[in-house]
Amino acid sequence: MLRFFYPILFLTVCVLTTSCETEIKIDVDKLDSHLVLNSLFCPDSLIQVRVSETRDVFNEIEYGDPPLVDISIYENSEFVEKLISEGGNIYSTASLIPRSNSNYELVVESPWGQSNALSTVPTQVVPDSIWIERKVGRTEYDVVYHRLAIQFKDNDLEKNYYSIFLRFEYLDSLHGFGYLEGESTLFCNDPIVNQEIDYDKHSDMNRQIVFSDELINGQNHELRINFFNIYSSKDPHKFVICMHFNTISEEYYRYLKTLELYKRQRNSNIWEDVSEPVGIYSNISNGYGIFGGYCAHIDTLLSVE
């Protein structure tokens, strides 16, 4: 019986380990490149613009020098200056620092033709009071979380958009400055922030809360946001929390909102949630990217143990 077993075993192994391979060539049209401009600006610094271009996914050529461009900046429809190259792919204004309640336009001449982008620096909304409530609950995994409370009055003279995030900084007393340790995961069940994006669940994707004043136009509001500590093995008493409360332009808001929705769609479970593809918002004509203004308000809070 064994004299038949080994030949059969040999033939079985040969069949299982040998396969036919057929090479199929797919003719995919090459996609043209496009100009990419990215600039987020606020009233405390010069305007910087990063310039690049899109690449075909099948293009194996390494990235070379950035495209040569000529960039002009306009404030309230009046020409101000041309941006100067700082080397690499960065261009900057020489003297123009943006102002609140002003409109700005980029006019860019490039190998792809002319591109334009418009945005504004909104009126800054400053919180009236901020405090931390410690150890307000535990997750289903028994992880303690805390709560940040922010009281503010929405500006009733214009449509307002906001973004909020928390950064933990480790204070280095030897060098006299702080090191960025990371951004905390945030979650919140307030209807004003969950009407378009779901922040109710504590997901690693929730590093920034983005919302509009659709439900609170001109009103006083108290926003409560839950967060986690992100201490490493370092001394927790040397940590501070930097709360960024930003008033952002509509263009910046639409970009951040679609970015948040894209991240959720990308990380969704295909067996539980089949959603439509999400395109990232761009306000660059004849190109891609974002040109958006904002006003930043930063408060430094004591860390929580």
Image (cartoon, grey):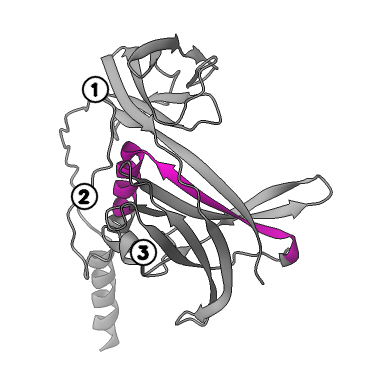
> Is 158 or 253 nearer to us in this picture?
158
Disc on res. 211: none
Give SS at disc 2.
loop
Q: Is residue 92 above or below residue 198?
A: above
Q: CA distance from mark 2 to mark 3?
A: 48 Å
From what the image shows, is residue 66 above or below residue 168?
above
Dot 1 crowding, Cα within 10 Å, few <14, some 14–19, many 20+: some
Per the image, label 3 sits on a secondary structure element best described as loop
The relative height of residue 97 versus residue 100 in the rendered view (above or below) is above
Sequence-wise, the earlier of marks 2 and 1 is: 2
| Residues in magenta, as a range | 237-262
Q: Amino acid at mark 2?
A: Glu
SS at circle 1: loop
- Identified at 42% across, 69% down, the residue is 202
Tag 2 residue: 21
Circles 2 and 1: CB distance less than 8 Å?
no
Q: Position of residue 1 (x, y in %)?
A: 25, 89
Which residue is pictured at 36% across the width and 12% down the height? 78
Is 128 displayed left or right of 209 in the figure?
A: right
Q: Quadrant of residue 249?
A: top left
Q: Amino acid at mark 1?
A: Asn
Return the residue nearer the eye: 142 or 126.
Answer: 126
Say whether disc 2 or disc 3 marks the residue closer to the N-terminus.
Answer: 2
User: Vertically, is 185 above or below 260?
Assistant: below
- Identify the mark nearer the N-term, 3 or 1: 3
Quadrant containing the C terminus in the rendered view: bottom right
> Is residue 196 among the parts visible in the rendering?
yes
Determine the CA span between mark 2 and mark 1: 44 Å
